[in-house]
Image (cartoon, rainbow, N blue to C red):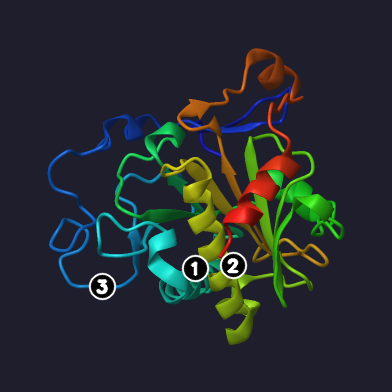
Amino acid sequence: MSDNDRLDPHSGARVHIVAARQHRPNLPSSECPFCLGGLESPEPYDVKSFENRWPALETGACEVVLYSSQHDATFASLGSSGIRKVIDLWAERTTQLQQQSDIDYVLIFENRGAEVGATISHPHGQIYAFDHVPRRQHSLLHSQWRPDPQPADRLIINGDHFAAYAQYAAIHPVSLVVAPHQQVPLLSNLSDGFRDELASILHKTFVALDQLFDAPLPYMMWITQAPAKTQFENAWLNIEIVSPWRAKGVQRYIAAAEVSTEEYFNPVDPADIAQRLRSLVV
């Protein structure tokens, strides 16, 4: 472990000191590097991935995933067919990265909106490939996480293979899970039928989320799946989608009492969010 990769001796939290990222581009107002002909996209593409020029990890890998060449596209506007292409790329990159000797855990994620730290508005996500299993993922995998078997009034969509529901103990005002009904460890293990339904459910979910407050919703999305080398029995693939908005343009901030205690005070009932999203799902 290098001096820039540190463990707090009391809490056990791992901190990566990434001072070089202070100099990365921030919300460029002129040329977008992800648009066709830009720095990262000289050739036409539908979806693509490439190494991040400003990696947050000293070991492992950091990649950018472009969802579309259209600058004003959103995850929702990709439609089911476009999202299916993204899912296939996620699965492909997971498989390729997990084959590297120095990679154990592949985290796929997206930040959408300046409110959650996105620096470029072009539709994209990222991949961090760690040489270890991060603490939160280790806890979930160790506890043998399972989808909520009875989400009841928190259920949003129930498909043949996947369900989307609001989390029971939601830290954020909007806090959703999309997971398969049966245990699947990795994106690469999903059959064509499973991938098609996942694309459809994600499309419906994100369309509803952008209608929830009649404005583009800032959100964070991440995927939990099985590690490459550390063994966990019955690892269960799942996707989490969270937003700090509790009303249109109104952000719910994590305050001192919450950060200091890791006990949270959510002003929004998850069942209310689920009911509103159910009414918006087409």
Extreme residue in the top direction: 256
Which residue corresponds to the image point at 64% horizontal and 47% vertical from the top-left?
276
Classify 10 Å Cα crowding around label 3: few (below 14), some (14-19), many (20 and above).
some
Q: Which mark is residue 77?
A: none
Looking at the image, is mark 1 or mark 3 earlier in the sequence? 3
Q: Position of residue 124 (x, y in %)?
A: 37, 55
The secondary structure type at the circle numbered 1 is helix
Q: Amino acid at mark 2?
A: Ile
Check disc 1 and report the residue beneath it: 90
Residue at image coords 61%, 60%: 104
Could you tell whether 229 is left or right of 70 in the image?
Answer: right
Distance from disc 2 to disc 3, alpha carbons, whole Å, reads: 24 Å
Q: Is residue 192 above or below residue 15?
A: below
Residue 273's x, y, as percent?
66, 43
Q: Amino acid at mark 1?
A: Trp
Camera-nearest residue between 254 and 128: 254
Residue at numbered disc 3: 45
Label 2 sits on residue: 201
Residue ID at (63%, 79%): 194
